[in-house]
Amino acid sequence: MKHMKSVFCFLLFAFSFNIFEAQVIYESFQSNKLGESREIKIQLPRGYNSDAKKIYPLFVVLDGDYLFEAVAGNVDYFSYWEDMPEAIIVGVNQSEKREDDCLYSEQNSLPIETGASFFEFIGAELIPYIQNKYRIGNFKVAVGHGETANFINYYLLKQQPLFQGYIVISPELAPKMNSFVTERLDKFETKIFYYLASTTNDAATIKKGTEDLNKGLLAIENKNLFYNNDNFEGPSHYSVPTHAIPKALEAIFSVFQPISKDEYKEKILKLETSPVVYLAEKYQTIKELFGIEKKILINDFKAIEAAIEKKEEFKYFEDLGKLARDQYPETLLGNYYLARFYEENGEPKKAMRTYQSGYSFEEIGGITKDLMLEKADTIKADFGY
């Protein structure tokens, strides 16, 4: 019960950000594919108009009647703390149309009639409309729950998938969906993110379907598949999205987040190659996935510095210094790491001069001018320069 309260407090806090800061738009969208208008909700990031060149990932949320606010609030909260990029959220209201929207053939498990029309509405009408109106990047995430969680998988089956991330919560899977999904994900040649959630209180058919799907996905050996699964103890089928959504965002956008203690211990300290290359590739992946030129965090420089110290691989300070100069050219950071490289590699005079030359740069991340001069004076005293 205490855990449940903490989750709902978290969401309430997140929604409070949403209400006061994020821009929410309600529209009636006239669809030729559906032959009717459909209510949609759009949340734009804080300060959307402040940077005309910035692009954003897109979330398309089915069951927008109740799922939109849960996704929008969490996305706003996570992006506020820079644990994921800011994103544009679009919710599609379905209410009494939900069953028709998700209609599929019992023979081949693929959308038919009203289900096929809804499939085309999302891909051929709604997303192009949002792309033309707002600055959308290439990275798109689909979110569904129950029947709609099954439905978003259909976009995965396209030769050119509409979405790169899938948040599949307690899906009511079509008979052939497990084999469709596992066969498709096994052959992906680009990065794809798939998050599957269920609860111990789901219906027996949902539990069986998600258990089988999880087993199939865990058996896939495809480096392009980033798969995460949670089976929550206790929540109902209807409350499980409040548990799953934050976990899904953490999983899908883990590369965007600062280096954590786990990443440091389980990945960086176990590297047999350069930790500086690891750092550069982390940020290159952010650029490739999300189209965002994210400046390397000082926290992440410090993590790589700590790994170099711990493993006594001081040769990597040279590359770290060059990277720091590129990212923070006006600061002491690059000079500090280059001086460390010279100091540890038997060039004390060069180290001393590099420490001294940093005096005209800005202080950063606990590296002060006094610290640089102290290190230079220590070398001078030790070697009598």
Image: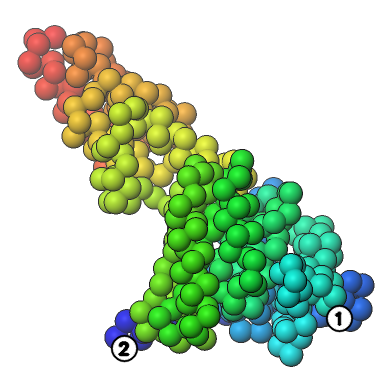
At mark 1, the secondary structure is: strand
Q: Does residue 204 sit above or below 118 in this rendering? A: below
Q: Nearer the viewer, residue 270 or 168?
A: 168
Residue 95 visible to an observer of this rendering? yes
Q: Nearer the viewer, residue 297 or 64?
A: 64
Quarter the N terminus occupies: bottom left
Three-letter amino acid code of the residue under disc 1? Ser
Q: As drawn, is 6 to the left or to the right of 242?
A: left
Q: Does residue 1 sit above or below 368 in this rendering? A: below
Q: As drawn, is 9 to the left or to the right of 40?
A: left
How far apart marks 2 and 1 lie (CA) works out to: 41 Å
Q: Residue at x 50, y 70 (%)?
A: 210
Q: Does residue 174 sit above or below 368 in this rendering? A: below
How far across and how far down the image is residue 26, in percent? 74, 79
How far across and how far down the image is residue 13, in percent? 44, 79
- The label number, if any, that marks residue 74 in the structure image: none
At mark 2, the secondary structure is: loop
* Residue bearing mark 1: 37
Q: As drawn, is 340 to the left or to the right of 232?
A: left
Q: Residue at x 64, y 59 (%)?
A: 180
How far across and how far down the image is residue 202, in percent? 47, 83
Q: Residue at x 33, y 47 (%)?
A: 263
- Which image quadrant for residue 268? top left
Three-letter amino acid code of the residue under disc 2? Met
Q: Residue at x 70, y 53 (%)?
A: 161
Within 10 Å of disc 1 (Cα), the crowding (few <14, some 14-19, many 20+) is few
Within 10 Å of disc 2 (Cα), the crowding (few <14, some 14-19, many 20+) is few
Q: Earlier in the sequence, mark 2 or mark 1?
A: 2
